[in-house]
Image: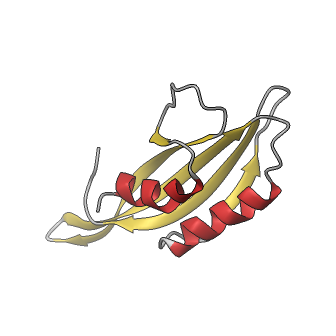
Amino acid sequence: MTLNQKIIAALSGFGNPVVPKLYTGKERVYYTFNYTLRPFQFADNYPVWYKALVQVHFFCPLTFDSVARQTETAQALAGAGFTWPEVIDVSDKEIQHLVFECETIAERMES
């Protein structure tokens, strides 16, 4: 399972779109995600594992009660093998935007 598939599987149970990088659909409640891969363990001067520094972004209207979803999202990520995420609220006057930062190990470089 790729890292993209792992993130999508962890969050798809909420019934909202989950896409890498940029969501261009019409739904008002959705997830996007991005990550950075850092070489983690080497053998013969080649990385065997990568540490994935993951950011999951949850977007919803200002009127959406996101308190329960914040906890549920953190639990879903941790249950899928990610570290327990730090949650950063970067909402503005127009939309709620919560960023879940966590880590996991990836087997190889992915695009």
As displayed, is residue 31 above or below residue 28? below
Q: Pick the residue in front: 101 or 32.
A: 32
Image spot of residue 59 (x, y percent)? 67, 39
User: Is 108 placed left or right of 28 in the picture?
Assistant: left
Q: Would residue 85 be visible to someone looking at this image?
A: no
The image quarter in which residue 86 lies? bottom right
- Number of marks in the rendered image: 0
As displayed, is residue 69 above or below residue 21? below
Image spot of residue 15 (x, y percent)? 56, 50
Q: Pick the residue in front: 30 or 53.
A: 30
**Extreme-front residue of the structure:** 15
Image spot of residue 64 (x, y percent)? 81, 42
Q: Would residue 111 be visible to someone looking at this image?
A: yes
Quadrant of the rendering where the N terminus is positioned = bottom left
**Extreme-left residue of the structure:** 44
Quadrant of the rendering where the C terminus is positioned = top left
**Residue at image coords 82%, 31%:** 92
Image spot of residue 93 (x, y percent)? 86, 27
User: Is 85 placed left or right of 52 in the picture?
Assistant: right
**Residue at image coords 51%, 31%:** 23
**Residue at image coords 73%, 65%:** 71
User: Is 86 placed left or right of 24 in the picture?
Assistant: right
